[in-house]
Image: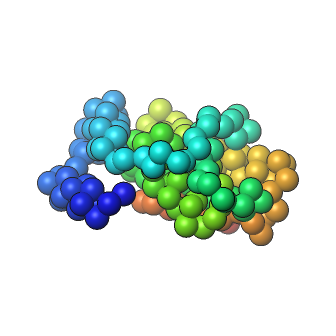
Amino acid sequence: MSAEELKALIGMMGEGGPDLAAPPAQARAEFEGLLSTVPVAPDLKIETANAGGVPGLSIAAPGVRQNRVLLYLHGGGYIAGSANGYRSLVGELGRAAKARAVAIDYRLAPEHPFPAAVDDAVTAYRWLLDGGAPAKSIVLAGDSAGGNISAVMAQLA
């Protein structure tokens, strides 16, 4: 993302951004609309992932170390956001960490109340372990609601 694109995104957020207090369908559409404005680097390899039954994306930049994994949990106030919407950010974080990245689509509230999102995160983490990723090579990350889910998940895992 260029400095100009980042400035435009910050400007949109400063103008109010998505209304997360709106009905969930509206909040989700507005949030995804905002995220869709973020460009995705063409060299990112993006594939669907099934993290132990939790849908998501596996994202890798050229040259990442396959034995290093970034598990990312998106923000969105627990009611919005998606792995697809966050693919650019997750891919660039993975690039910086020289790690393949996995972003999951944890179940959203209010249809799936707590602890559904945490359960999905723990499931994805265990899937990584079962797939051969050593615990010491997995980095948990997230923003906003995803940051909270990461912290709770780390305590449980």
Give the x, y percent position of residue 106.
56, 42
Q: Is residue 54 shown left or right of residue 2?
A: right
Residue 152, picture quadrant: bottom right
Residue pictured at 32% horizontal, 60% vertical: 2
Vertical placement of residue 64 versus 114, above or below: below
Give the x, y percent position of residue 109.
46, 40
Q: Is residue 132 shown left or right of residue 57?
A: right
Give the x, y percent position of residue 51.
70, 41
Judged from this view, the residue extending furthest toward the top is 25
Of residues 149 and 11, the one drawn nearer to the viewer in this rendering: 11
Q: Is residue 117 shown left or right of residue 30?
A: right
Judged from this view, the residue extending furthest toward the left is 15
Residue pictured at 39% horizontal, 50% vertical: 77
Residue pictured at 78% horizontal, 64% vertical: 135
Residue 1, picture quadrant: bottom left
Q: Do we see residue 148 in this rendering?
A: no
Of residues 93 and 41, the one drawn nearer to the viewer in this rendering: 41
Q: Do we see residue 95 in this rendering?
A: yes
